[in-house]
Image (tube, grey):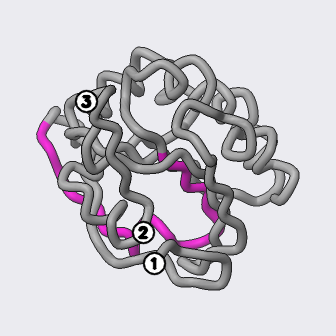
Amino acid sequence: MTIKAGDKLPEGALMRLDQNGRPETVGMDQLAQGRIVLFGLPGAYTGTCSTAHIPSFIRTADQFRAKGVERIICLTVNDAFVADAWAKATGADKAGIEILADADGSVTRAMGLAFDAPPAGLYGRCQRCAMLATDGVLEVIQIEDSPGQCTISGGEALLEHA
């Protein structure tokens, strides 16, 4: 079942690289404290993710923070090394956006957001979506009908609900 407004974000762990470049896990309970934006996407370095989704949150990051959002987190079903390299390549790291790896897809599956797109070589990926949550409780979730679209899940669209 797909997560919806009013639901609690699932337990689980995402991965990032620590200051020494080693993978470390960070619990969803830690990430979900306070008011956060969490957006999921099919994969690092993929077309729409790189040209539309990440840039929309880079453009709106300061506006979200002005509205009380403490963290902006991007969830991608990739490994922590890819997530870190993509954060640097896109400038998301400089914008204060945390790109975290759901390496085994368990958090994505727990939210009911996993999908496969065999023609593109994508398996167990996250549907393109954007969420607002406070203390782990989902306030808003917007899920695209197609992984190639970035309309209701973009930064500007979510900002209207912040």
Amino acid at the residue labelled 3: Gly
Identify residue for label 3.
121
Q: Position of residue 161 (x, y in %)?
A: 84, 59
Q: Earlier in the sequence, mark 3 or mark 1?
A: 1
Q: Relative to residue 48, is residue 117 drawn left or right? A: left
Between the residue at mark 1 and the residue at mark 2, the CA separation in whole angstroms equals: 5 Å
| Amino acid beneath label 2 | Gly
In the image, which residues are magenta? Answer: 22-40
Q: Which of 7 and 159 is in front in this view?
A: 7
Disc number for residue 128: none
Disc nearer the start of the sequence (1/2) = 1
Do tag 3 and tag 2 residues touch (Cβ < 8 Å)? no
Residue 1, labelled with which disc? 1
Q: Distance between the Cα atoms at labels 3 and 2?
A: 20 Å
Q: Which mark is residue 112?
A: 2
Which residue is painted at 37% across and 51% down in the image? 115
Q: Is mark 1 on a helix, strand or loop?
A: loop
Q: In this view, does 45 lie above or below 129?
A: above
Q: Position of residue 10 (x, y in %)?
A: 40, 77
Where is residue 101 shown, x and y percent of the image? 29, 46
Which residue is rendered at x = 25% and y = 29% of the image? Answer: 121
Please state, as top left, top right, bottom left or bottom right, where the N terminus lies in the image: bottom left
